[in-house]
Image: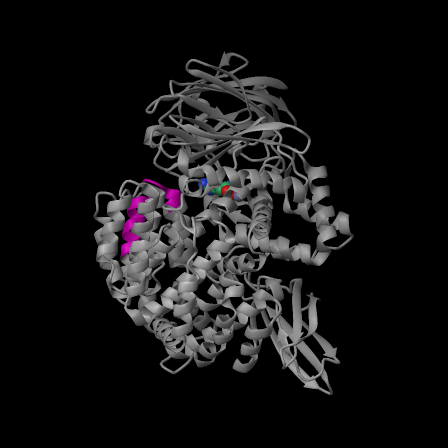
Amino acid sequence: VTHYLADWRPFPYEIAETRLEFDLAPRATRVLSQIDFRRLSAGDLVLDGIGLDTLSLAIDGKPLPLDLIDAERGRLTLPAADLPDSFTFAAEVAIDPEANTALEGLYLSGGIFCTQCEAEGFRHITWYPDRPDVMAPFRVTINSDMPVLLSNGNPVSRAEGRAIWHDPWPKPAYLFALVAGDLRAVPDSFTTMSGRKVALNVWVRPGDEGRAGYAMESLIRSMQWDERVYGREYDLDVFNIVAVDDFNMGAMENKGLNIFNSKLVLASPETATDGDYERIEGVIGHEYFHNWTGNRITCRDWFQLCLKEGLTVFRDQQFTADMRSPAVNRIQDVQALRARQFREDAGPLAHPPRPDRYQEINNFYTATVYEKGAEVIGMLKRLVGDDGYRAALDLYFDRHDGQACTIEDWLRVFEDATGRDLTQFKRWYTDAGTPRLTMTEDWADGALTLHFRQETAPTPGQPDKPARVIPIALGLIGPNGDEVLPTTVLEMTAAEQSVSFRDTGARPVVSLLRGFSAPVTVAREIGADQQALLLTHDTDPYARWQAGRDLALDGLIARAAGRTGGEEFTRAIAGILDDAEADPAFAALCLTLPGEEEIATAIAARGAIPDPASIHQARRGLMQEIGTRHEPVLARLYDAMAVAGPYRPDAEGAGRRSLRLACLALLTQLDDGARAAALFDTAGNMTERQGALEQLIAAGRDEQALAAFAAEFGDNRLVMDKWFMVQPLRAAPDKALARARELAARADFDWKNPNRFRALIAGFTANHAAFHAADGSGYDFLAEWLMRLDPVNPQTAARMCSAFETIARYDSARQVRARAALKRIAAMPGLSRNTDEMVSRILAGL
Ligand code: ARG
Ligand code: ZN
C-alpha cells in the first residue's frame, strides 16, 4: 500500500494520559496499557498493532471481543457508536523481545532490553494510535529484576524489581523508550539557565565506563550551546543516554532517554578515530537538540519528517562548526551532501525533502530528508539574514510548542517574522532533483556580465521542474589575486537571469557559489589557470577548495579516458603545501583527491560512461605523480604533523593528523608502505593506526598488521568493525571480493548485528571498482547478503539497496547484471515491504 500526504486526516480522539506496565521477560513480556481517550470528532477509534499476542481488550473495564482485530492489516477498529465521549481503553498483550531481530519495538541487545519506536515501532509493543500527531503524557511501570530500569521523563519511584516513570510532556508514541539491563552510569549534572538542576547519565555495559566520558562532555556542551544560541532550555530533572550494540541507525531522541548505537557513544584514543569523536559530538548534539526540534514541536505526519530532521541536522552542523572549524566542517558537509544526496537526487530513489507518498516510511530516513532538509534551512537563513532567522525561530518555538506541525507551519513563521513571501521558495521542499546552474560570462567595456540559467532534470513522478529561488553567493578575484568584490548574494528566481559588475579593473575571475550557498551543481567555462588562481587566492574557503577539486577532477577525467591530465593540479597544490601548516585540516582536504565514486559521477555528468577500472588506475596514477613531484615537502610535512604529547580529540590535533595521513597516502605510492608500516607499529591513537592500516591494505602489505590488529582488539566489537570494514574497502579491486567472502565466512562475522553487517558489506560496496566489477560478481555478492538479511532485519537490508541506485550510469552489460541481481531479490518469497519498495523503485529506473 502507498500512503499519500493528501490523505492525512486529524485523529478523531485525543489522549489525556497513557499508562503502561511492563513485566519484562526475554521470550514473553507482558504489556498492560490503559489509555484515557476523549472524543474530538466523529469517527471510529482505529489502533495499530503488529505481531501482538493479544490477551485481552477492554473499554472502561468491560471486555471487548478479540475479533475486532484485523491481524492482516495490523488494526483494531472500535466503532464510534460503541464508544462514550471519554473512556479508558485497556489492553493486555504479550510480545517476544528475544525473537525481535528487526530491532523495531522492544528487543534485546546483548542482554539489555531496549526499544526503537521511530517511525512505527510502538505498534510492535501494544495497541495504540501510532502516529506522531497523537500526543500524550506517559506513566510507565517496569517490573523486572534487571538492576537498571529506565523510561522517559522523571523517575517517580524505585523499589525492588519495579520502577515507575512519569513523562509530563505530551509526546507521540515514537518517542517512547524503555531500557532495562545491567548497566553502569557515567554521571554528571547540568544546571540550566533558569536554575533547574538536571542529573545526567550515560549508561554503558560494565567495563565500558572508561569510554563514555567524551559523550558526556559532548552532552554538556550541547546543553550549553542550545541555551546560548537558540535560548532553549532542558525541561526534565534527568537526561539519560544509553549505548546499545544492536541498533539500526545512529541514535534516537526519545524524550529524556536517548538510545544510541554504541559506536556513537564509546570512544578512547586507542579505539576511536578523530572522525569517531567528531561524529559522537555531532550526534549527541543532534539527539539533544531534538528535544526542542522534534519533541516539544513534533511532526504532524511522517511526510513532514524533514521538519524535525532537516532543522536538527542544521542545528547540529551549526554546533559542530562552533565547536570546531567552520570552514573545514562546511566543506565536509558539502562533500557528504554531494556523495549521498546528489547521488540520491540523480537516481531512481529521488524524492523531495517532503515526499508526498511512501510505502515504507523507514525508507525515507534519507540524505534528502536529513541533509538536503538542512541545506534548505541554510538557504532560508541566508535569504532572511541572521536576525530574521532568529526572529522566525523564536516565533516557531513560541507559536508551536506542544504541537505536531507541518512544513507549511514552518514556512509561515518565516513569512510572519520577516514579511517575505516564500511561495516559490517552498519548491525546495516539494520538488525533487538537484538544479543545475549554468553560468556564462561576457566581458565588454570594462563590465563583467554573468548569465545564469537553472534547470532541473525530471525525477520519478515529477516531469516538470519550475524555477526555484537560488541564493547565489559570489565574489570576484582580480588577476593578481586581490578580491575586487566581496561576497554578494544574488537571488535567482527565474529560469534565466543576468547581472553585471563594472569598475573591477582588469577582468576578474568569479568565485562562484561561495560557502556552497545553494545545493546545486555548477556548470561554467573556466580555464585551468583561473581555477589555479582561485585555489591560491580565493578568500572563501569553500570556493577555494572547490576550485582545486574541479581542477583535480578535470585531470582525473582526462586520465581515466586514457589521456594525460592533472599537471595543473599537481603544480597548483604547491601553494597549498607551502602554507599547509597554517591550516592543516584545510590543506588535507585540498590534498585528498576526489574518490572514485565522485570521479564516476563527474564523468557521467559530462555524458560519458564511467569505467570503474580506469578510474581506479587514473586516481592511483595521479597520486603517484603528485607524490613524486612533491616528495620532499610531503615527507617534511608528514614528520612535522606528528602531534606531540597525549592524544586529544580536538579539531587542532585532528587537523594535523588528517594532513599527516593525506601526506602518507601520497608517500605510500613511493615508499611501498614503509612509512605506513612504521606508523602502524608506533602510533598511540586509532586515527593514525587505522590510517596506516588502510594504506598497508591498499599497498598489499597488510598481513602482519591485520593479524596484530585482530590480536590486540579481537574482543572489542567496535574496533573489530573497523577491521572488517577497511579490508574490503581498501583492498585492490581485483582482490576485494575474495577478501570480503573470506571475512564473511568467519565465525566473528556476526551479520545479524547491523554495525558488523554494514562494516563488511557496505565496506565492500564502497570499493567502487570492486563493487562494479565487469563480471557482476560484486552485484551478486550484495544481492546474496541482502537476501540473507532481509528476513532478519528488513530496515537495514532495505537501506543498503541504495548501493544499486547509480547503476543506470554504467554500461549496458553492467546494467544487465545488476538488473538480474535486483530481480532475484524482488522474486524472493516473503520479501519485506521495506526491501520490496526499494528494489522496485530502483528497477523502475532501469
Ligand atoms: N530520529 C532519529 C535521528 O534522527 C532516527 C531514527 C530513525 N530510525 C528508524 N528506524 N527509522 O537521530
Ligand atoms: Zn534526527
Q: Position of residue 434 (x, y in %)?
A: 55, 63
Q: Is residue 745 above or below residue 163?
A: below
604 falls in the magenta region: no
Q: Is residue 42 visible?
A: no
- 765 or 80, nearer to the observer: 765
The foreground one among 259 and 660 is 660
Magenta region includes residue 789:
yes
Q: How far from the left and from the top, in percent, is residue 558?
A: 41, 79
Question: Residue drawn 55% across and 52% down?
Answer: 324
Q: Which secondary structure is most common in the magenta stretch?
A: helix
Apparent side of residue 454 relative to residue 485 in the rendered image (left or right): left
The picture places residue 388, in percent across and down from the top left corner, at 74, 51
On screen, residue 128 above or below 798: above
In the rendered image, which quarter contains the C terminus? bottom left
Q: Which residues are magenta?
A: 781-796
In the image, what residue occupies the spot 34% across and 70% down? 616
For residue 751, which quarter of the picture?
top left
| Residue 470 drawn at (x, y percent) | 65, 64
- Taking the image as shown, residue 781 lies to the left or right of residue 398, namely left
Is 573 positioned to the left or the right of 198 in the image? left
Closer to us: 120 or 264 = 264
Q: In the displayed image of the protein, which residue is found farthest to the front? A: 645
Q: Is residue 39 above or below residue 823?
A: above
Q: Is residue 29 above or below residue 741?
A: above
